[in-house]
Image (cartoon, rainbow, N blue to C red):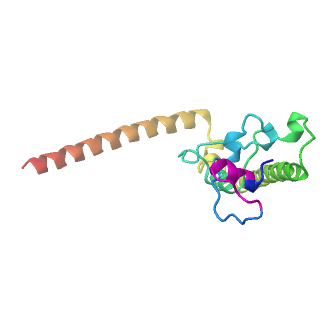
Amino acid sequence: MTTTNEIVRQNSSEAVDPTEQVSVLEVDSKPAQDADTNTMPEEEQYDEVDMNDKNMDPLEWSVRKTVPIPKKYYFETGNYDVSFQTKAWHRTIQAMGMTLRGVENVGGFFAGILGLTNSRYDDVIAYMSEEELEQARETAKRDKEKRKAFLKDKENQKSQINVV
């Protein structure tokens, strides 16, 4: 490992007294992760995603913005020779994911009980016979065609008024 005095000596042409205090150093400002991505174990690398993706869930965006997600967990790769901090980080991320999945399942269960996952007309459709259901579909189709024709006529009337 290079010391401060060795770095200063490398960057300047004059000899430096090791007892002198150095106030300004020239230091390479490249991020350590970019330089050592190939030598760093997968457990220490972060999973990179496009944070500007419009389809990303807001909850996922906020978590990824604050908490780095590892590419691979140490217990998936079998590499148990990592630091305690890495193990704690991986287990914390795993526990948060399991908690979120559990809460989603409980919420889905209660939403199903309250009828929030069903259609507004499920209770009506459930008690209709096949003939009544077919008749209702035909009536809905006819009504939809009437609405389209009405809107088209209304649009034609507006365009005629604008011409005059």
Q: What percent of the width, then of the height, locates residue 21? A: 72, 66
Residue farthest to the right, as pictured = 80
Q: What percent of the width, then of the height, locates residue 124? A: 61, 47
Q: How many marks?
A: 0
Name the one closer to the observer, 18 or 58.
Answer: 18
In the rendered structure, the answer to whether residue 100 lies left or right of residue 121 reads right
Name the one closer to the observer, 99 or 143.
Answer: 99
Going 83% across and 41% down the picture, which residue do you hit?
73
Going 79% across and 37% down the picture, which residue do you hit?
42
Report the magenta residues as a range.
Answer: 6-18
Question: Does 91 sit above or below residue 79?
Answer: below
Going 86% across and 34% down the picture, which residue do you hit?
77
Question: Does 17 sit above or below residue 71?
Answer: below
Q: What percent of the width, then of the height, locates residue 84? A: 91, 51
Residue farthest to the left, as pictured = 164
Name the one closer to the observer, 127 or 155.
Answer: 155
Going 66% across and 51% down the picture, which residue do you hit?
60
Q: Is residue 29 visible?
A: no
Name the one closer to the observer, 99 or 52.
Answer: 52
Question: Does 107 sit above or below residue 159?
Answer: below
Q: Is residue 84 visible?
A: yes
In the rendered structure, the answer to whether residue 163 lies left or right of residue 13 reads left
In the rendered structure, the answer to whether residue 152 lies left or right of residue 100 reads left
In the rendered structure, the answer to whether residue 96 lies left or right of residue 16 reads right
